Image (cartoon, grey):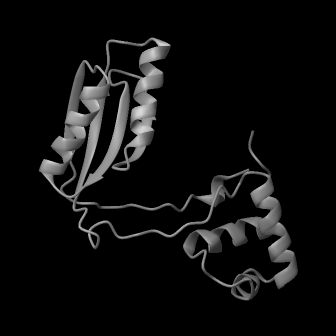
Amino acid sequence: MSVQLDETDRKILFELQRDAAQSLDEIARKTGSSKTPVWNRIRKLKQRGVIRKQTVLLDPEALGLEACFFVLVRTSAHDSDWQARFLETLRARPEVLEAHRLAGDVDYILKVRVRNARAYDEFYQALIARVRIFNVTALLSMEEIKATTELDLTSAP
C-alpha cells in the first residue's frame, strides 16, 4: 500500500536522499519549513515505513572491492525447502548486495561485490556447496555508468 505524500514530505525526502547527514536546520531551510515540523514529519515518515533506515554509502573501490558481478541463477528446483535454503544462503553472504526473484527465463539475479575474480569464484563455490543450482551465469560489470539510491519522488502518489 502506498503512502500519500504532500509537497513538503517530498522536499524533505529529496533532501534526506541527497544527504541524510544534514542537520534538521539545514533541511528546514531548504524545504521552507522549520526544525520541529521537519523533525515531526521525518518521525511520521519512519512510522509509516517510507523511511526504512538511514545509513552511509561507502565507495567499494576505495575499500578494494573492485569487481561487481551480476549473477543470473536458473534452478530446476522450485520447492519451498530449496527456496528457503537458497534465500538463507544469500542472506548470510555479505558479498550479495542485492537479490531479486525474476519473471522469465532466469529465476534470480544477484548483485555481488568482491575484490576480484578469484574472490567471486570463492563465493560461487560456497554457494553451490550449499544449494543445488541448475545454471549460473556471471556477468562482470566493466563500468558502472549510473548508480543511485535516490528514488524519483515526482511520480510517487
Say which residue appears at 55% left-offset and 66% top-offset: 55
Above/below status of 109 relative to 57 = above
Q: Residue 78: x, y in percent? A: 42, 13
Q: Residue 102: x, y in percent? A: 43, 28
Which of the pair 30/50 is nearer the observer?
50
Indicate left or right for 152 with 103 as reference. Answer: right
Q: Residue 119: x, y in percent? A: 18, 50
Say which residue appears at 25% left-offset and 47% top-offset: 69
Q: Residue 110: x, y in percent? A: 35, 40
Q: Quadrant of residue 151?
A: bottom right
Indicate left or right for 37 with 125 as reference. Answer: right
Which of the pair 31/48 is nearer the observer?
48
Above/below status of 12 relative to 105 = below
Indicate left or right for 97 with 118 as reference. Answer: right
Q: Quadrant of residue 126?
A: top left
Say which residue appears at 24% left-offset and 42% top-offset: 123
Evaluate whether residue 5 shows in this view: no
Which of the pair 43/81 is nearer the observer?
81
Evaluate whether residue 78 shows in this view: yes
Q: Quadrant of residue 39?
A: bottom right
